[in-house]
Image (cartoon, rainbow, N blue to C red):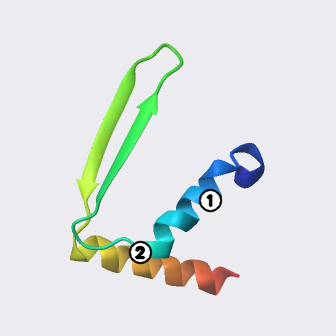
Amino acid sequence: RLARSHPKVPAFLKAVSKEGIREGTVIEIRVTEPEGREYITNLRVNEEDLACMARLSELQKNMR
């Protein structure tokens, strides 16, 4: 459903995951309201984050 509504998202995620997210990678999240107000944050990926992402990926594989 997400892919139908937002076709660029799967391609983006595929491109990012192709190289892999490594320690030190910065992930930025920006939310812009219709009125123009923005909320922005970022995080620098560390070892703990990578371990969490690996666990989530494994859970996803097991749900298929």
The residue positioned farthest toward the top in the image shown = 35
User: x, y (%) of residue 63?
Assistant: 66, 81
Q: Which residue is mark 2?
A: 20
Q: CA distance from mark 1 to mark 2?
A: 14 Å
Q: Residues within 10 Å of mark 2 (few under 14, many from 20)?
A: few
Who comes first in sequence, dot 1 or dot 2?
1
Which residue is found at the position 25% from the left and 75% from the top? 48
Circle 1: residue type: Ala
Q: Is residue 4 left or right of residue 33?
A: right
Residue 59 point in image, percent of width and height: 54, 81
Q: Secondary structure at mark 2?
A: loop
Residue at image point 21% right, 66% down: 24
The three-letter amino acid code for the residue at tag 2 is Gly
Q: Residue at x 26, y 54 (%)?
A: 43
User: Foreground: 10 or 15?
Assistant: 15
Relative height, residue 47 to residue 33 (above, below) = below
Image position, residue 47 (x, y; %) = 23, 77
Of the 4 image quadrants, the one containing the C terminus is bottom right
Determine whether 59 is above or below 7 in the image. Answer: below
Helix, strand or loop under label 1: helix
Asked which quadrant contains residue 36, the reply is top left
Nearer to us in this view, 15 or 35: 15
Q: Residue tagged by mark 1? A: 11
- In the image, taking residue 28 as reference, residue 58 lies left or right, namely right
Q: Nearer the viewer, residue 48 or 36?
A: 36
